[in-house]
Amino acid sequence: MSTSYTQGGEYLRPLRIHADRAGGRLEIDWADGHHTEYDFVTLRWLCPCAYCRGEAGMPGWLDSSPSLTLAQTQLTDIQLIGEYAIAPTWADGHHTGYYTFDRLRSECPCPEDEARRRERPHARHQLG
Ligand SMILES: [Zn+2]
Ligand SMILES: [Zn+2]
């Protein structure tokens, strides 16, 4: 048994990240055995970048509830950012959103996690 504690532990360590482009889903298998699946549309709406979310009190693009085009919800590539995040590239060229593992896990849309969030609304983690 290792006594070293990596950031977030097993809970936040993805063993496998798979973008299923044909199925329009992102799948993540976590080290603790949990499985997370996002459809690309849901994932796009979660984009945490300053453009989508706003900054310094200004609302972001997603706050204006835009109707997303097909290109904006089509994932073309996904990049691993260090040991803590992924950056998807969307078909419209948008690629500035760093989705931390922390966020991807805490927003997991499975029924189990939906129920947990209803019972215990969590404080959103913010980057930077
Ligand atoms: Zn964005
Ligand atoms: Zn879940």
Image: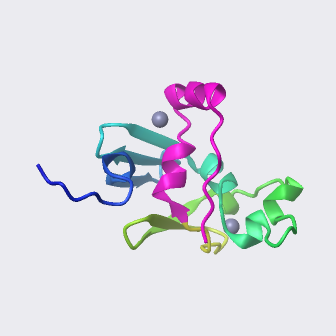
Numbered disc total? 0
Establish if 97 lies above or below 73: below
Of residues 42 and 7, the one nearer the viewer is 7
Picture residue at 82% right of the left edge, 65% below the top: 60
Q: In which quarter of the image is residue 57?
A: bottom right
Q: Which residue lies furthest to the front in this view?
A: 3
Here the colouring is rainbow
Q: Residue furthest left?
A: 1
The stretch in magenta equals: 99-128
- Residue 8: % across, % down: 39, 54
Picture residue at 88% right of the left edge, 57% below the top: 64
Q: Say whether residue 40 is magenta.
A: no
Horizontal side of 59 relative to 81 (left or right) equals: right
In which of the image's four quarters is ligand 1 placed?
Answer: bottom right
Placement of the C terminus among the 4 image quadrants: bottom right
Establish if 50 lies above or below 121: below
Of residues 2 and 52, the one nearer the viewer is 2
Horizontal side of 107 relative to 8 (left or right) equals: right
Q: Say whether residue 119 is magenta.
A: yes
- Residue 116: % across, % down: 56, 28
Horizontal side of 126 relative to 53 (left or right) equals: left
- Residue 49: % across, % down: 67, 69
- Residue 123: % across, % down: 65, 46
